[in-house]
C-alpha cells in the first residue's frame, strides 16, 4: 500500500534520462514547461556516436513502443483526471513493469560482460578518466570544506559562549529579560546555521572552480563533476540543518533541549541517511546509468535506497518507545491545551509518520530519480512551513483567548451584560478561526505531498463554492451576533439604572424580558435557516415540513397553545409583573419569573410554584395602584364602642409618627363602624389606605399599637363564654363548690380590670423609628414602673367542704 500511495504522489513522473528533442506524449507537459533545443542532424549524429546515449535512446524508444495508446487528438484536454484507484493501479502496473524490464536488461548486460571477459577498452578508458576527474574535484571540495569547518569552529565556540551568557536587565522586569534571552539564543542558532550553510556553498564553489581550472581546456565541467558538486551541496545543506537541530558540540546552539548522547545519536544516524540517499540518488545512480548502462544504474539506485530505507526503519522502530515517552512528558508541561493534545497524538503515531516518509522517498526515488529529492525537499519544506505558521497562529489565538476583554467603566455601568457577552462571543469566534487554520494547514500539507491539488481545487468551481460558503456562513453568524448584541444591549440599557434615568416599571421589565427572549428565538431560528441554505440544504421542504409538524403539534398540544395565548393577553392587559404579590390558581406569593407560557411564584414558605397560564382563571394582584389594610377588631359586649373607636384613632395617630410607616399611608384612617354583633362581641372595621404592597407592613405596625392602646384602656377582647351547671340534689340544694371570693368591692368607676388582662400606662415610645417595617411588631411595649393602684386584689380560699356565706337573696328557692 505504501508503494501504491507513493506512486500516486509521484504522478506525472518523467523518464530517468531525457534525450534533448525526444519526449513521449506523457512527457509533453514537462517539455512544454521547459522546451528543448531543436534536434538537428549534426546533434543526432553526435548523440548516436556515444554508446551510452545510443543505449538510452534505444531504451526510450522501446518504452514508447510498450506504452499504452494515447487518446485521440480530439479528446478534451480539460477532461477530469482519472480516479484515485485508477491512478494507483496504473502507477503500480507501470512501476512493476519498468522494474522487471530493468532487472532483465541488467542481467543480460552483466551476462554479456562476463562472457566477453570485461568491457570494451574505449569504454574502460572513459570510465577511468571520468572517475579520476571526479576524484580531483571531490578531494578539493572536501579539503576546502574541512578547512572552513575548522576555522568556523572558533566562531561557533564564541557564539555558543555569547548565547549561554546570562542576560538580565538591571531595570526591566524578569519577563523582559527572558524575552531578551530568548531573542539572543534564537539569533545565535540562526547565525550558526547561516555560517554552516555559507561553508557548504563556499566548498561547492571551490569544487566548481577546481573542475573548471584543474585541467585544460579551462572552463569546461564534466557531467560527473557537476553531479558531485550538486550532490555535495544538497547533502551539505541537509546535514547543516541536522547539525543546527542537534548541535552535538554546542548545547546552547541546540534547537531542542536534549542530552548530549541523544543529540550525538540522532545527528550521526540522520547524517548517514542523508549522505547515502543524497549521493546515491544524485551521484551514484546517474553515473552508473551514464558510464555503465541505464538498467544497471537504476538497479544500483534501487539497492542503495532499499538499504537506506531498511537502516532508517530500523532506527525508527528501535527508538519509538523512547521518543514516545519524551513527547508525552513534553505534552504534560505544555501551557496550551491544544499543543498538549497535538503532542500526545504525535507521541502515538510519530514512528508511523516517519516510516511513511521514508517509504514515500524510496518509491519516488525509483519512479522519478531526477525529481525525487527536489520533490521530497519541496514537500518537506512546505509541510514544515505550514505546520510552523499554523502553530504560531494557534499560539497567538490561545494567547488572545487567555486575555479577558475589559470595557470602559461607563459602558459597563450602562450595559452591565455587554462585557460578559463579548467575552463569550470572542472565544467562540477565535476557536472557529483555530479550526479553519487547522483545516488550511492540513490542505497545504496534503498539497505538498500531491495528495490534494490545492491550487487546482481553489480555481475549480467546487473550491470557489466551498470558500464562498465558508465566507457567507461566517458573515451570517457575524451579523446575527451583532444584531443580537445591539438588541440585547438596548434592552439592558433600558433596564439598567444610572444617573439621570428613572427606574423602569415592573411592566417594562416584564415586557422587555419577554421581548428579549422572543428575539433570541427568532434570531437563532433565522440564522439556522440561512446557514442551512448557504451550505446547500433546500429549506423550502424544511419550512413546509415544519409547518405541517407545527400544525400537528398545535392540534396535539392545545394546552400549550392555550398557555401561550393566555400569557400574551395577560401581559397585554398588564395583569401582573415581576415582584408583584399575587394570588393565582390558589397560590399566594411573589412573582419571580414570567415567560410566554407560565408564571413562577415564590410563596411565603419559600416554595417555588410554576403555574401554566392555561390554569389561570383569576389573577388577584395586591400591588396595583394602592392597597388597603382592612382590620376587623372585636370587643366585648360590656365595652363602649365609642371608647374603642377613640382608641383606634389614637393608635392611628401614633402610627403616623413612625418615620418608616407614615409615608406609606395615603389617607386618614377610615372607621365605618360596627359591622357585626354576635355571641362574641361587637366587631369594628378599620380601613387604612397604603401604597401598593405596604398594606401588610402597615397592618403589623397598626395591630401592635391597637393592642397597646386597648391594654392601657382596659378594653377587653372577648373570651369564649360558657355556662356551667352543677345540678342539685333531691332537696333542691346545689352541692358545695370551692370558689374564690373578692373581699373588696371595686370602685364604681365602670373600669374594672378584664379577666386575664394586665393594665399598663399609655406612654409614647422612645427612641428612633424601626429601620425595617416588617419588624415593627417585634418591638417591645413600654412597661410601667409601678403597677396601677388598686390592681392588687386579696383573695381568700374557702375551705373545701364548707359552704360559703351568701345573702338570703342568693339562697336557692
Image (cartoon, helix red, strand yellow):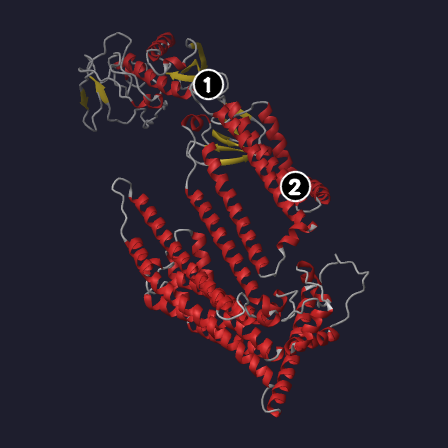
- To which residue does mark 1 refer? 501
The residue lying toward the viewer, choosing from 481 and 615, is 481
The CA distance from mark 2 to mark 1 is: 39 Å
Which residue corresponds to the image point at 48% horizontal and 48% vertical from the top-left? 393
Which residue corresponds to the image point at 42% horizontal and 51% vertical from the top-left? 336
Left or right? Give the position of 538 relative to 440: right
The quarter of the image holding the C terminus is top left
Left or right? Give the position of 231 relative to 48: left
Q: Relative to residue 732, is residue 143 depicted above or below?
A: below
Mark number for residue 411?
A: none
Q: Relative to residue 462, is residue 228 depicted above or below?
A: below
x then y, percent, for residue 696:
41, 21
Would residue 595 be visible to someone looking at this image?
no
x then y, percent, for residue 785:
18, 15
The picture quadrant where one finds residue 782 is top left
Local SS, label 2: helix
The residue lying toward the viewer, choosing from 73 and 342, is 73
The residue lying toward the viewer, choosing from 74 and 527, is 74
x then y, percent, for residue 784:
21, 15
- To which residue does mark 2 refer? 529
Would residue 62 be visible to someone looking at this image?
yes
The quarter of the image holding the N terminus is bottom right
Q: Are marks 2 and 1 in contact (CB under 8 Å)?
A: no
The picture quadrant where one finds residue 756 is top left
Left or right? Give the position of 386 relative to 730: right
Q: Relative to residue 592, is residue 134 depicted above or below?
A: below
Looking at the rendered structure, the number of numbered marks drawn on it comes to 2
Few, some or many residues within 10 Å of mark 1 (<14, 14–19, 20+): few
x then y, percent, for residue 376:
54, 64
Return the disc, 2 or 1, that comes first in the chain's sequence.
Answer: 1
Few, some or many residues within 10 Å of mark 2 (<14, 14–19, 20+): some
Amino acid at each position: 500500500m505504501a508503494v501504491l500511495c507513493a506512486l500516486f504522489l509521484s504522478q506525472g513522473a518523467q523518464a530517468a534520462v531525457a534525450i534533448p528533442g525526444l519526449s513521449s506524449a506523457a512527457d509533453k507537459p514537462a517539455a512544454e514547461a521547459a522546451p528543448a533545443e531543436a534536434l538537428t542532424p549534426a546533434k543526432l549524429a553526435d548523440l548516436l556516436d556515444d554508446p551510452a546515449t545510443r543505449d538510452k535512446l534505444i531504451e526510450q524508444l522501446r518504452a514508447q513502443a510498450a506504452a499504452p495508446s494515447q487518446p485521440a487528438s480530439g479528446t478534451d484536454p480539460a477532461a477530469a483526471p482519472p480516479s484515485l484507484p485508477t491512478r494507483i493501479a496504473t502507477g503500480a502496473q507501470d512501476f512493476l513493469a519498468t522494474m522487471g524490464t530493468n532487472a532483465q536488461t541488467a542481467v543480460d548486460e552483466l551476462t554479456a560482460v562476463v562472457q566477453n571477459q570485461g568491457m570494451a577498452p574505449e569504454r574502460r578508458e572513459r570510465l577511468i578518466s571520468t572517475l579520476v576527474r571526479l576524484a580531483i574535484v571531490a578531494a578539493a571540495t572536501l579539503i576546502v570544506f574541512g578547512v572552513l569547518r575548522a576555522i568556523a569552529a572558533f566562531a561557533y565556540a564564541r557564539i555558543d559562549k555569547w548565547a549561554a551568557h546570562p542576560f538580565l536587565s538591571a531595570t526591566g522586569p524578569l519577563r523582559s529579560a527572558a524575552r531578551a534571552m530568548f531573542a539572543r539564543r534564537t539569533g545565535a542558532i540562526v547565525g550558526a546555521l547561516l555560517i554552516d550553510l555559507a561553508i557548504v556553498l563556499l566548498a561547492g564553489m571551490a569544487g566548481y572552480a577546481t573542475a573548471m581550472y584543474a585541467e585544460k581546456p579551462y572552463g569546461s565541467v564534466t557531467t560527473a563533476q557537476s553531479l558531485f558538486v550538486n550532490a555535495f551541496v544538497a547533502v551539505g545543506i541537509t546535514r547543516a540543518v541536522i547539525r543546527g537541530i542537534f548541535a552535538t558540540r554546542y548545547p546552547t546552539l541546540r534547537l531542542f533541549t536534549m542530552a548530549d548522547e541523544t543529540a550525538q545519536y540522532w545527528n550521526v544516524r540522520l547524517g548517514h541517511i542523508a549522505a547515502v540517499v543524497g549521493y546515491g540518488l544524485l551521484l551514484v545512480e546517474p553515473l552508473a546509468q551514464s558510464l555503465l548502462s541505464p538498467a544497471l544504474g537504476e538497479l544500483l539506485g534501487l539497492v542503495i535506497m532499499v538499504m537506506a530505507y531498511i537502516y532508517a526503519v530500523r532506527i525508527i522502530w528501535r527508538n519509538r518507545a523512547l521518543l514516545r515517552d519524551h513527547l508525552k512528558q513534553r505534552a504534560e508541561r505544555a501551557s496550551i491545551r491544544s499543543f498538549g493534545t497535538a503532542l500526545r497524538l504525535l507521541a502515538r503515531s510519530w514512528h508511523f509518520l516517519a516510516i511513511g516518509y521514508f517509504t514515500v522517498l524510496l518509491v519516488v526515488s525509483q519512479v522519478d530519480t531526477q525529481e525525487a529529492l527536489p520533490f521530497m525537499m519541496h514537500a518537506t519544506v512546505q509541510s514544515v512551513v505550514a505546520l510552523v505558521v499554523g502553530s504560531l497562529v494557534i499560539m497567538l489565538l490561545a494567547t488572545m483567548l487567555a486575555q479577558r476583554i475589559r470595557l470602559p467603566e461607563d459602558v459597563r455601568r450602562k450595559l452591565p451584560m455587554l462585557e460578559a457577552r463579548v467575552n463569550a462571543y470572542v472565544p467562540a469566534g477565535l476557536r472557529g478561526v483555530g479550526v479553519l487554520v487547522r483545516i488550511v494547514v492540513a490542505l497545504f500539507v496534503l498539497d505538498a505531498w500531491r495528495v490534494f491539488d490545492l491550487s487546482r481545487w481553489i480555481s475549480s468551481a467546487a473550491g470557489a463554492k466551498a470558500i464562498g460558503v465558508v465566507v457567507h456562513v461566517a458573515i451570517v453568524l457575524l451579523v446575527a451576533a451583532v444584531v443580537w448584541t445591539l438588541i440585547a444591549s438596548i434592552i439592558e440599557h433600558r433596564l439598567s439604572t444610572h444617573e439621570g434615568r428613572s427606574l423602569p416599571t415592573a411592566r417594562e421589565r416584564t415586557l422587555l424580558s419577554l421581548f428579549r427572549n422572543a428575539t433570541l428565538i427568532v434570531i437563532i431560528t433565522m440564522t439556522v435557516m440561512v446557514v442551512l441554505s448557504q451550505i446547500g440544504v433546500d429549506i423550502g421542504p424544511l419550512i413546509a415540513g415544519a409547518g405541517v409538524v407545527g400544525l400537528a403539534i398545535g392540534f396535539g398540544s392545545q394546552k400549550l397553545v392555550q398557555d401561550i395565548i393566555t400569557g400574551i393577553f395577560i401581559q397585554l392587559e398588564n395583569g401582573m409583573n415581576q415582584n408583584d404579590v399575587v394570588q393565582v390558581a390558589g397560590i399566594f406569593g411573589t412573582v419571580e419569573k414570567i415567560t410566554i407560557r407560565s408564571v413562577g411564584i415564590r410563596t411565603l414558605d419559600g416554595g417555588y410554584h410554576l403555574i401554566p397560564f392555561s390554569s389561570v382563571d383569576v389573577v388577584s394582584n395586591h400591588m396595583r395602584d394602592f392597597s388597603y389594610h382592612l382590620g376587623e377588631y372585636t370587643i366585648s359586649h360590656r365595652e363602649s364602642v365609642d371608647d374603642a373607636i377613640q382608641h383606634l384613632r389614637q393608635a392611628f395617630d401614633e402610627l403616623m409618627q413612625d418615620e418608616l410607616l407614615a409615608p406609606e399611608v395615603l389617607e386618614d384612617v377610615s372607621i365605618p363602624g360596627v359591622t357585626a354583633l354576635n355571641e362574641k362581641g361587637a366587631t369594628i372595621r378599620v380601613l387604612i389606605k397604603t401604597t401598593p404592597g405596604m398594606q401588610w407592613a402597615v397592618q403589623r405596625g397598626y395591630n401592635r399599637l391597637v393592642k397597646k392602646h386597648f391594654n392601657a384602656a382596659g378594653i377587653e377582647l372577648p373570651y369564649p363564654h360558657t355556662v356551667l351547671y352543677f345540678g342539685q340534689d333531691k332537696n333542691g340544694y346545689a352541692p358545695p363548690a370551692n370558689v374564690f371570693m373578692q373581699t373588696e368591692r371595686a370602685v364604681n368607676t365602670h373600669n374594672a380590670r378584664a379577666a386575664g388582662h394586665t393594665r399598663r400606662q399609655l406612654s409614647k415610645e422612645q427612641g428612633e423609628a424601626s429601620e425595617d417595617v416588617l419588624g415593627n411588631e417585634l418591638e417591645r411595649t413600654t412597661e410601667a414602673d409601678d403597677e396601677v393602684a388598686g390592681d392588687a386584689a386579696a383573695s381568700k380560699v374557702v375551705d373545701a367542704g364548707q359552704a360559703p356565706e351568701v345573702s338570703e337573696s342568693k339562697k336557692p328557692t
